[in-house]
Image: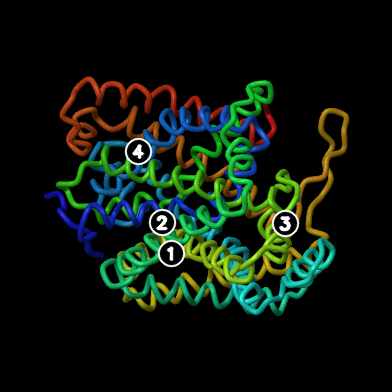
Amino acid sequence: MRRETSIHGQWSSKLIFVLAATGSAVGLGNIWRFPYIAGENGGGAFVLIYLACILAIGLPIMMAEISLGRRGRQSPINTMATLSREEGLSRIWGMVGWIGVAAGFMILSFYSVVAGWSLSYVFRAAGGAFSGLDAQGVEALFNGLVSDPERLLAWHTLFMIMNVLVVARGVRSGLEQAVKFLMPALFVLLLVMVGYAYSLGHFGEGLRFLFKPDFSQVTGDTILLAMGQSFFTLSLGMGAIMIYGSYLSSRASIARTSAAVVSADTAVALLAGMAIFPIVFASGLAADAGPGLIFMTLPLAFAEMPFGLFFGTLFFVLLVMAAWTSSISLMEPAVAWLSENRDIERPMAAVIVGAIAWLLGIGTVLSFNLWSAGFGFHVSWGGEVIYVGGTIFDILEYLTVNILLPLGGLLIALFVGWRMTRRSVEDELGIGSRLIFGAWYYVLRFAAPIGILLVFLKAINII
């Protein structure tokens, strides 16, 4: 008999699920990556392409992943094994769950280190560390942080403890209570930052940079970049959305809740751009600073602005909240599996997962200082000698973002679209309109896999 609830618990409402799934999707990438890649790739033109890709790739895969989670009501590993048996399929499909949990676990290990930077900058901003600094001073401040393995390890440790404390308390007492506070606070802080940016007098310039369409900058690479962003921004293929879906009530509409999550995630990314770029332009700084925008460009802006100490602190608190809601969702699938398969109480399972991820994260800590030279070897390919390797951080990021996540998303689309019976899929999704279901099913079977495959080939430099 099919389970109505997970043994780990259930979200108290559809709104809580939307907040939790949005929290999983919203991370550091929404706050800094989306705004600057949009600005560099045609502004509004990129945003339009991104929204189209969200509808063609992100939303269909999210609905499929949530439906798998709710149908299985277990950790992603056990869910995929159970559903494969029910559908009379090969046990090899159970590997989809393993790929997702492994990817999420590895991402957690290095994500915690980068989130530790944000945590460090909260205290730096609050203590007035940016005051009076010029560009060289801000750069030296950041380099001083990442070049010190002991300080990086301390912030990495603190952030991982924050995750363990939430996940150890379970669905209702831990995850739900965290997102009930963190997500509304994140939206409020974003709106406050947008209001502050508006007051600086360069709001129109920031909006034009972000939203004015410039189709002359749109190339095939731009479209592939938008596809990749639409997929990765929603935390798809890493087990987080599947495990959160397992805690969703059977009465909730997967289509409507997925649309709400996608809308909220996109809103955060756009609001972040509306907050960041007016601040950058008001300070006469470069908007195309890329990854350095957060930790080297914005601190310089806050150092020169009225109330910069207060709003700089708020901004980095915002970053920590975004990172925290994402990282607890990365930890949850592995904790659920340990609880189900090894008869380990949840608090101890959270400690074990957190400790192993913390240990793996030490490799990322050292990647920015003692082991910055990296590890690798040279191979001969097509008459050229190519270096293969990098730092531990480089290797983990490449393996997860470029290989495991698109592979997991592709396999989810193929499993739901081609291997599960249509009756099973219709039964779980519960879409009343056959026309709407048919359109979604077609996109999931054809458009989404092709899009993910193109992103995958681009990521590994085949196209």
Q: Quadrant of residue 433?
A: top left
The kind of residue on which mark 2 rests is: Gly
Q: Earlier in the sequence, mark 4 or mark 1?
A: 4
Specify the amino acid type for callout 4: Ser
Q: Nearer the N terminus, badge 4 or badge 2?
A: 2
Q: Earlier in the sequence, mark 3 or mark 2?
A: 2
Please state which of the two labelled residues, at mark 4 or mark 1, is closer to the viewer. Answer: 1
Marker disc for residue 90: 4
As drawn, the label of residue 233 is none
Mark 3 or mark 2, whichever is nearer to me: 3
Report the disc number at residue 297.
Answer: 3
Q: Are the residues tagged 1 and 2 within 8 Å (C-beta)?
A: yes
Per the model, the C-alpha gap separating discs 4 and 1 is: 32 Å
Residue at (37%, 33%) from the top-left corner?
60
Which of disc 3 and disc 4 is earlier in sequence? Answer: 4
Helix, strand or loop under label 4: loop
Q: Is residue 404 rendered to the left or right of residue 76?
A: right
User: Alpha carbon of mark 3 to alpha carbon of mark 2: how far?
Assistant: 26 Å
Q: Which mark is residue 23?
A: 2
Question: Residue, x 63% and y 22% (percent of image)?
Answer: 215
Number of disc labels: 4
Q: Amino acid at mark 3?
A: Thr
Q: Position of residue 65 (x, y in %)?
A: 35, 42
